[in-house]
Image (tube, rainbow, N blue to C red):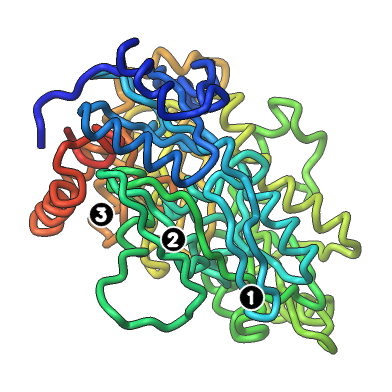
Amino acid sequence: MPDRLNDADQAFVDHLRGLLPAAAFLDASDTFLTEPRGRYRGKGVVVAPATTDEVAALIRACNAARVGVVPHGGGTGLVGAQVLVEGAVPIILSLSRMTRVRAIYAEEGVMIADAGAVLADLQTAALNAGKMFALSLGSEGTARIGGLLSTNAGGLNVLRYGTARAQCLGLEVVTPEGEIWHGLTRLHKDNTGYDLRDIFIGAEGTLGVITGAALKLSPIPAVEGSALLAVTDPAAALSLLSLARDIVGEGLSGFELMSRVGFDFMMETGLMAAPPLQPLPDWQVLLRVGLSAGSDADDALERIFTAASEAGLVQDGLIATTTDEANRLWAMRETIPEGNRLIGSIASHDISLPLSRIADYIPEAARRIAALGPLRINCFGHLGDGNLHYNVFAPKGEDRKAYDPIRKQVSAIVHDLAVEMGGSFSAEHGVGRLKVGEVEQYNDPVRLNLMRRIKASFDPNGIMNPGAMLRS
């Protein structure tokens, strides 16, 4: 890997202006220089190509001049992959002008789109074609599909439909040398060599730039239903998950664990007037079923509730009686991160665990963190796929900045225990620049060496998102 890249100086920008139209050059506003948590402020020259050929021309020029490239989708990532703070001034490659839905093959269940297409727009396009694009997460109104694939995003529907990787058939990618890989296959089976798609998905722009994607579309469930259930503890929530699967099978599409602290935060910050279930339980599960025609979602939810109550897993609950009520429940779940943001965490974590270890992890992590002081913990997440958002906060009324000296200790407790229990320190937010140290600390040495060799092979000049995922 080279020791040094060159600045995108005025001479180089003038060279780019001879290759690309004037509309491709955007102001370097805060939109492109900051990330949502405010931990990083980057630098760079913003260029927004409108076509894959323009991306290729830009990358070829950057590679020849050894100028770094930071791909930028919707800017919603939480690990700093979209900003570069240190080193030479890079080109910030924005996908904001590449937003087309190129084609929809409804009978095949396939949609082909530019990498800059916003997730919510793709969801709407699929619905207009009588299908569903099942990837769903809180930032779907601004997140772009290229970035979501580059981080292998998860979200609310992973339990049934899988991560972004599982919902992608093929990619179009511009390599670090400016070549275009035309991999927009609509095939579900193609065993003709290495699966390049899986190499680029989750690579966070360090191996190339995704410019287009062939996406899987799913049938729209004929009937849906949602329920909010109070459970005694995370162990009961896991038993409820197993019970619900026994009753509705693959019809269970969402299963979210929420702690009392998340609701306290929403009320403390004015995001919620009163909780749906009162008195407020310590733990709640929000679940959703999507069933075929002729099925009764309310009946399925009532059977789940009755069986769970008889087993002593559930003390209270409500079943949404209208679509609006169900939407309000899921909007409540998606408001938890906003409450966290307004309170301000000492340290936030995105971990995953084997399902059988979650009930052990949550109390043990809390016990270890309590040794540091009377800190507040908001643990919530996608229980069905083992993904927890484990966030730690200062005591009520105290300034979180006073706890900055113990931030690394907090994260070490959370991550060490996750790895001890066979889990991961990063489940769906990626590595970015925030967790490069953890990649080095926790990864199997052979895997880490293979990753470095792949990076060096694909990007020998080290121009692609330098410093993200792997240390430059």
Q: Which callout, 3 or 2, points at the residue further toward the start of the chain?
A: 2
Residue on which the image places disc 2: 171
Real-space CA distance between mark 3 and mark 2, rounded to the nearest whole angstrom: 32 Å
| Residue 176 visible to an observer of this rendering | yes
Nearer the observer, 11 or 449 = 11
Please name the amino acid that badge 1 sits on: Gly
Mark 2 lies on a secondary structure that is strand
Residue occupying image coordinates x 35% and y 50%: 364
Q: Which callout, 3 or 1, points at the residue further toward the start of the chain?
A: 1
128 vs 66, left or right, is right
Residue extending furthest right? 322
Please name the amino acid that badge 3 sits on: Val
267 versus 212 height, above or below? above
Q: Position of residue 431 (x, y in %)?
A: 33, 42
Residue on which the image places disc 1: 109
Please name the amino acid that badge 2 sits on: Leu
> Counting other residues with Cα less than 10 Å from the Cα at mark 1, is it few (<14), some (14-19), or many (20 or more)?
some
Q: Position of residue 365 (x, y in %)?
A: 36, 46
Q: Position of residue 374 (x, y in %)?
A: 43, 28
